[in-house]
Image: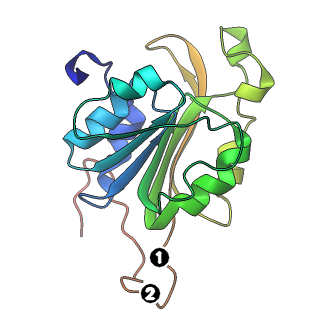
Amino acid sequence: MHSQLAAPSIWLTRWAHLIRPGGRVLDLACGSGRHAAWLAGQGFAVLAVDRDAEAISGLPAGIEGRVADLEQGAWPLADAGRFDAVVVTNYLHRPLWPHLMDALAPGGVLIYETFAAGNETVGKPSRPDFLLRPGELLEVARGTLRVTGYEDGTLAVPREAFVQRICAVREVPRGEPEAAPPRYPLPGWSQP
């Protein structure tokens, strides 16, 4: 039951207001489903994906789950369409980045956070394959997404870790409906 799940990432809760109300969200490498459950509770339609069939079978009701190995074979979500948000935490497989960008609908939000270089000095993961290089998430977004938030540093809670995180939006192309520049209200700020 999702009431026993760990609290969602504060990075996700900070930026979730940018996701289209009621929109479709992809929770990639969802693990136990803490983010999928929180997002569903906020009224989003969530597709939670993980290679762990037991984790997927334990997702709360109302969340669509899919078992898929994201690191073997073709992109397993080619039939899933586009999403209003893609959420990834504590997972890194660089070959997926083009697929994640393609999975974002115009106006879609990428909320991504994972371990970064330096984490090898405080624990696991420690292999470079699993650690973002300095500025790497900014490079991934460059030319494709508009960055609304970015951090690269250390956390003390729930344990000491080096992390990098980004919130970035795929802007609506000119000439399409709602082509006005998107608004990125910051929590606590009044909107014009």
- Tag 2 and tag 1, C-beta contact below 8 Å: yes
Above or below for 40 versus 78 = above
Determine the residue positioned at 31% across, 23% down.
7
Q: Seen in the image, is 113 located left or right of residue 54?
A: right
Q: What element carries label 2?
A: loop
Considering every residue shown, the one lying at the far right of the view is: 128
- Disc 2 marks which residue? 176
Determine the residue positioned at 42% across, 77% down.
181
Callout 1 amino acid: Val
Determine the residue positioned at 52% across, 33% down.
29
User: What distance separates the C-alpha of mark 2 from that of mark 1?
Assistant: 7 Å
Measured as percent of width and height from the top left, residue 152 is found at: 61, 34
Tag 1: Cα neighbours inside 10 Å, few (<14), some, or many (≥20)? some
Viewer-side residue, 100 vs 116 = 100
Residue 98 position by quadrant: bottom right
Measured as percent of width and height from the top left, residue 40 is found at: 25, 42
Q: Is mark 1 on a helix, strand or loop?
A: loop
Return the mark for residue 172: 1
Viewer-side residue, 64 vs 106 = 64
Q: How many labels does the image show?
A: 2
Visible in this render: residue 24?
A: yes
Considering every residue shown, the one lying at the far bottom of the view is: 175
Quarter of the image where the C terminus is located: bottom left
Q: Seen in the image, is 119 located left or right of residue 182?
A: right
Viewer-side residue, 174 vs 154 = 174
Quarter of the image where the N terminus is located: top left
The scheme the figure's colours follow is rainbow
Return the mark for residue 47: none
Measured as percent of width and height from the top left, residue 99 is found at: 63, 55
Determine the residue positioned at 44% across, 13% down.
158
